[in-house]
Amino acid sequence: MKYRLNLFRFLLTSVIATLTYGQNGNEEKEYKRIAIIGAGISGNFAAKYLSDYDDKCLLDITIFSPPNSATDENSEDAAQGSRVSSTTLADGTVVELGASIIFEGNKLVNDMIDGDEELIKVEPHFSGRNVTDKERTVVKGGLGIFNGKSKDNPWALLLTNMTSEESKKTILWRYNLDLWRIHRATQKALNAFDLIYDLVDSTHEATFFDSPNDVWRAVGLAHAASVSFDDYLDYIGVSSHIAWWKSLLGGQGLMRSEFQTAVSICNNNQLNSQMTGLAGLVNSAASTGALFSIKGGNDKLLDSAFRQAKKKHDQVCSKKDMYAESKIRRITKKIKTFVSEFEHGIELFDEKGKSLGVYDVVVLAAPLQFSGINFLGKGSMFDSSVLHSISLNEMVDSDNSNANEHDHRHAIGGHLPSSTTRSYTQVITTVISNANLDTSQFSLDKDKVPTSILFTEKGREETGISSIGQITASVFKIFSSNKLTDDTVSMLFGRNAIIEEEKVWGGRDGGATPAFNGGGESSYSSRFNLYDGGHGTSSSTLYYTNAMESSVSAIEISAIGSKFVSKLIAQRFGLIETTSTASEEEL
């Protein structure tokens, strides 16, 4: 009897397996395999968004992270990796090495935080320590913009030891109408981003966008995304020179050369003429609302997104299939070769030529120009085993009648816009402890040291520094274009100063942010869909989340790119039912 029961269970299991996984009993035939190359914000967020769409337990997702991508910048093989990174000092203080602050208006990042009770919002700079104000070593606060010792007035702006109301009055007096114009333009940009959030959640067929250029056009930001920040400031009436009537009031009309330049240098290590208008507006958004960091480091967002993706997938699949094991995973491997077998899928290989599997869809969640991937296709009319370079899809500005004349060939094969081949700006983050800022180097009284020091173009030329942030009484964080020499550290912070961390965002494999090159043709994005070897079938497709970085780069921008790409993939696999009607808010 026991034998018959066991046999019955065996037969029942076989029947269920056949119904669930297909007539041949091979579960891999039914799962849609997705490889995500890159384990930064866009890679992990893409996994989360795909799991949200997957209510059929259909997706098998693998995230490939290159070894040492976020920690070993000296490795010859190290990739750029995430620009969200932190370090913990001996006393427990966490210092952000990359993206330091998060804006309260960043809806997608906030949604991710709300989905994980382990993520706690805290005040920027003190994100590593859960202590009271009495226990914390308090620094005096304030903002300063250093204009260079060679200037008659070394400090363009100095707000140390002022109340909030005094700081506002000082800024308003100095920048007056220009400040209002910038604020008005920034508010319009924030309203446009609210429209993006409606579009990314909509299932209307018109909201499955081909490219970021289409997104910017849909929400009214195409102009800001395509011109330099200097040109955009001209457009909104922020003058590059001081009107005669402003000069009578004393030191006014300098918003552009002082404040906006200093912010562009600090956040992007680029001048206004090199930025796009949209990148400049995103920088300005930080001044319109509250800012925060995540306790323990903003890089906790990466693991949280992965955990949430896995949790959602496992919950759905446990209901759909009692035999399903988790099919969301991360693997530390550097992808070297991509081989499309057209409708049969894409095979990925590591640096040693070892196959890492065949996938229906590959998501590139890292800058294309630093990926180091060989994009190949298999087969020809004479020999199906022959490998050849494949052409990745070209994207041009459809509003430019001469756009088709541009031919941007890339070594990996294909016609691509320069936004996929350009360099990124190098930034060095240096964390220094046991430090005491030598105020004489900045023509500054000892009781007027601001917490944050930004630099104008002249200030950066003289010092080689983009910003100095005081984390605690004796800990400072410096952004610079090149590594600080021991003599420079000693001169600025004293002989006993200790370099705790030196993070290089740059070199052969990446940088801090894209070199925007002043907009224009450089702002043309690639398509989200870089390659469709299956010609509309569900296999052999390459998507590109970092296409969003053609005009602007930020944590939230990476999240937006991931959401649009995930939506396209969900549509491809029938996980979304598109509609042809929508509310006015969605369109």
Image: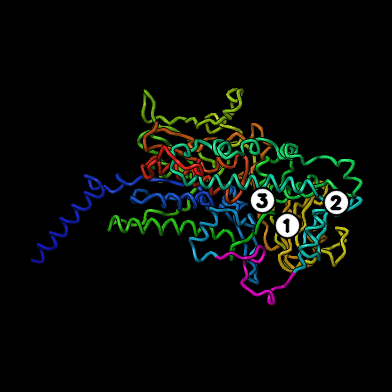
Question: How far apart are labels 1 and 3 at the CA level?
Answer: 22 Å
Which residue is painted at 53% across and 36% down in the image? 211
> Amino acid type of disc 2?
Gly
Residue 285 marker: 3
Residue placed most toward the observer, 377 or 246: 246
Badge 2 density bin: few <14, some 14–19, many ≥20, Cα 10 Å:
many
Q: Which residue is drawn at 80% across and 40% down?
A: 239
On whether residue 435 falls in the magenta region, the answer is no
- Majority secondary structure of magenta residues: loop
Q: Which of marks 3 and 1 precedes in the sequence?
A: 3
In the image, which disc is placed on residue 148?
Answer: 2
The answer to whether residue 481 is visible is no
**Disc 2, SS:** loop
Residue 172 in view in this figure: yes
Q: Are marks 1 and 3 in contact (CB under 8 Å)?
A: no
Residue 132 vs residue 66, the one in the foreground = 132
317 displayed left or right of 489: left
Q: Nearest to the eye among marks 1 and 2: give it.
A: 2
Q: Quadrant of the N terminus?
A: bottom left
Q: Which of marks 2 and 3 is nearer the N terminus?
A: 2
Q: Do the residues labelled 2 and 3 touch (CB within 8 Å)?
A: no
What is the three-letter code of the residue carrying label 3? Ala
